[in-house]
Amino acid sequence: MILVIGGAGYIGSHLVKELVVSKKVIVLDNLSTGHLSAIDNRAVFVEGDLGDRKFLDEIFTQYPIDAVMHFAANSLVGESVIDPCKYYQNNVASTLTLLEVMLKHNVKKFIFSSTAATYGIPNVHIINEDTITNPINPYGQSKLMIEKILADFSKAYNLEYVIFRYFNAAGAFESAEIGEKHYPETHLIPLVLQHLLGKREQIAIFGSDYDTPDGTCIRDYIHVTDLARAHILGLEALLDNKVSTETYNLGNGLGFSVKEVIETCEKVTGIKANIALSDRRDGDPARLVASSEKVFNQLGWKAKYQLEDIIKSAWKWHEDEKF
Ligand code: UFG
């Protein structure tokens, strides 16, 4: 049985939809940011908190867990600067409790959601896994701390893990039964689409004087279903003992500027956006684009969806949000 922590959240719920096809799944989520209705009903659901040692102990005693996939985290860069304690508590301390309980129950296979924010402001055009990590905010720090803890735990306790560093997750499940829904929403693609649906008056571009061809920030957008598929390949490789301590970037290898994303949203929807040029947002690197060569070479994973497909699937979801 596979324990998916944060399986009610955006990326976790998309993973669960794919994973229930081949595995028995138990979802643990405290529903602080996730949605009950996003959890596939083929999975067992337990509501509770990651930092609750007694509760975790009961779950590991009750269910025969082979591996843990950990998606639960606070993930807003801006909020992490204002309230770092929340990020170190939830993302680091609670994860440490989870790892301790896993080891106590001899569960030693772990998939961890990390982030491009671990790289900070990279000095290369295309980021690979050897690019120096130097986070510039507590969110990125909190994820990198767990990455380091995992490396130490693997040496000391034989914990085996796969770390995925996501670039910009976007899009929705093909059927549009689940999709991206954050409160508050801060991500570019949902904000543009909500604006085009008339739910927001305009879309602000945060900074148009970056050192990029059109002056706006460049990001690597990756479909959430592509992310989910990578996790399943990572899990299978861990369970089959083909990998033991690997870190992979997950991106498309293609960068799109904020302006290009807005233009693609206009093209997909046929609606013109009302754009406001605004100041830079603190902590935004000019360009974050991944090399995903390593995950292709080792796990055979490649992104299937490109920006237009991503936006089409997100649009289908936002037009008729189910939760
Ligand atoms: N942006 C705007 N206007 C908006 C919202 C966003 O111009 O209304 C811009 C941002 O400034 C940024 C780009 O659009 O340049 C993408 O912003 P998102 O908020 O969609 O995504 P981020 O790149 O900031 O964040 C993502 C993940 C984080 C992760 C980070 C790694 O959501 O969890 O990548 O840098 F930490």
Image (tube, rainbow, N blue to C red):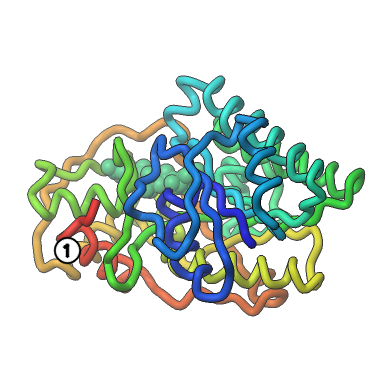
- Report the quarter where the N terminus lies: bottom right
Q: Along the line of sight, which residue is nearer the eye, 315 or 260?
A: 315
Residue at the limit of the structure toward the right, as seen here: 156
Q: Residue at x 67, y 31 (%)?
A: 53
Q: Is residue 282 above or below residue 151?
A: above
Q: Is mark 1 within 8 Å of ligand 1?
A: no
Does residue 47 sit above or below 82 in this rendering?
below
- The image shows residue 159 at horizontal and vertical percentages of 82, 51
Give amino acid for label 1.
Glu
Callout 1 crowding tier (Cα within 10 Å): few <14, some 14–19, many ≥20 = some
Q: In what element is the residue under mark 1?
A: helix
* Image coordinates for residue 149, horizontal then vertical, percent: 77, 39
Residue 74 higher or lower than 38, as above or below? above
Residue drawn 55% across and 55% down? 26
Instruction: Tell me what residue is drawn at x 29 percent, y 72 percent.
Output: 175
Residue drawn at x 41%, y 74% as measured from the top left: 305
State left or right for residue 316 relative to residue 287: left
